[in-house]
Image (spheres, grey):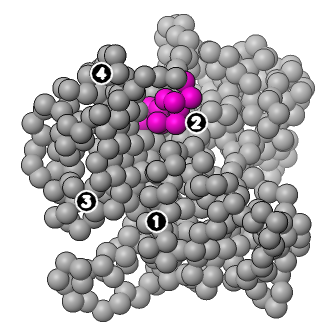
Amino acid sequence: MRKYDAIIIGSGQGGTPLAFNLANKGWKTVLVEKHNLGGSCVNYGCTPTKTMMASAHAAFKIKKARDLGIEVDEPSVNIEKVWERKENIVKSFRGGIEKGIKNTSRLDYINGKASFSGKKEILVETDSGPESLTASIIIINTGTKPALPPIKGLKETPYLTNLNIMDLKAIPEHLLVVGGGYVGLEFGQMFNRFGSKVTILQRGQQLLSNEDEDVAEEIKTIMEKEGINIKLQSQVEEVQEKDGTIELTYSTGNEKNKITGSHLLLAAGRTPATEELNLKERGIETDSRGFIKTDQWLETTSQRVFAIGDVKGGPAFTHISYDDFRFLYANLVENKHLPLEDRLVPYTIFTDPQLGRVGITEREAKERNRKYLKAKVPMSSVARARETGETEGFMKAIIDKKTDKILGFTMLGSQGGEVMGAIQIAMLGNLPYTTIRDTPFAHPTYVESLNNLFSSVE
């Protein structure tokens, strides 16, 4: 039995920095990871997807160069070189973590599958045999994995998820995407720009179900303009492989249809990676979907066992996982006793143009019976967007009618995620919208358009 002060299961963007910081504070710590170091962000999420999207964006910009007066030939995509660049960047990020572990005293690393085997014990199955660990504090950071929808024939049909689609060495002729959330849209647009025909099937009435209807409709228009086929209210019922192609049956209302493609991508949500942890052995409860229940201190239903990141449910973003680390570290090491209250959650969907959002949507304002003001301007009225030829999308803000404080902001436009950050800071500072309206920003920049946005309040 190897004894530690802390055992961290999972090396995602919460677990890894927590391991480093606990060890540097003198805690004897062990980091256990079943797969590659870095979690989903480094290996399957943020890093590789945004790296490949940069290549797709370059190809698209070349195609659009004629609109700016530049005569060029059609781009040719070398998907193997795109893949090699992605792999090199991922390995570089992963290598940095490996180097950090080697250079950190009082920090051990075990590559293996962890599960609870006793009240204070963790059993880790490794290639060289099982190892038993114990610690007074255990942190779970195992994240999520792709959800597999209940589709007839799926088990017998080859399919892709975000875990392996970026390993393709050939561009799909026709990519069928099940799911119209951010994963489906990002990959759909990426491969469309690489040269694939793309069809996205979404069972709901709109893409991006958590967004306002006008946002979803605008991004649908943008995608369709690029040639992506989008089918809403389409429930996928059956898939099967026939002569090297994928045949997909879906229903829209009472009407059934079939469509064939070369590849199938499942992007229908995420499910927590908890089934191998043997949580019941430690009395750790989960919700109906398998996410670990935590309190305002991130503690599970088992004392001194904590959960951080996506595995506990809630906003599934790298920056939230990292914020969980900072919060838990402050309580465990610095004895701050901070409760995890409602936090302002920003996020960016890296379609092109980007969708940046922070705070509540207009739909949420209505559902909460908030009295609000609204400001909205199209990107076509933004000077910088017109100069760069990136005029698709719009900006929208929701404002408290009584206090003039900003309740929410959405920007579907070039650099939407970057501009959103400025509004997040204003919201954290409780600034009224009039302060931004009357502030001189540098010209010509995208953030300068906030003057125009908040001058349109009604």
Q: Earlier in the sequence, mark 1 or mark 3?
A: 1
Asked whether 389 or 170 is in front, the reply is: 389
Work out how far the residue at label 1 is from the one at label 3, CA to CA, in angstroms: 15 Å
Q: Secondary structure at mark 1?
A: helix
Asked whether 51 or 36 is in front, the reply is: 51
Q: Earlier in the sequence, mark 4 or mark 2?
A: 2
Which mark's residue is nearer the viewer, 2 or 1?
Answer: 1
Image point (74%, 45%), residue name:
271
Mark linked to residue 315: 2
Asked whether 239 or 131 is in front, the reply is: 239
Magenta region: which residues?
358-368
Q: Label 3 crowding class (10 Å Cα cut-off): few <14, some 14-19, many 20+?
A: some
Where is residue 84? Give x, y as percent.
Answer: 49, 73
Work out how far the residue at label 2 is from the one at label 3, CA to CA, in angstroms: 31 Å
**Relative to residue 110, is residue 149 depicted above or below?**
below
Q: Is residue 280 left or right of residue 73?
A: right
**Kind of residue sitting beneath label 1:** Thr
Q: Earlier in the sequence, mark 2 or mark 3?
A: 2
Mark linked to residue 221: 1
Where is residue 442? Give x, y as percent.
Answer: 10, 44
Q: Is residue 433 left or right of residue 441?
A: right
Residue of label 4: 404
- Residue contact at pointers 2 and 1, CB within 8 angstroms: no
Which mark's residue is nearer the viewer, 2 or 3?
Answer: 3
Residue of label 3: 380
Residue 383 found in image quarter = bottom left
Could you tell me which quadrant the C terminus lies in?
Answer: top left
Q: Label 1 crowding class (10 Å Cα cut-off): few <14, some 14-19, many 20+?
A: some
Work out how far the residue at label 4 is from the one at label 2, CA to CA, in angstroms: 27 Å
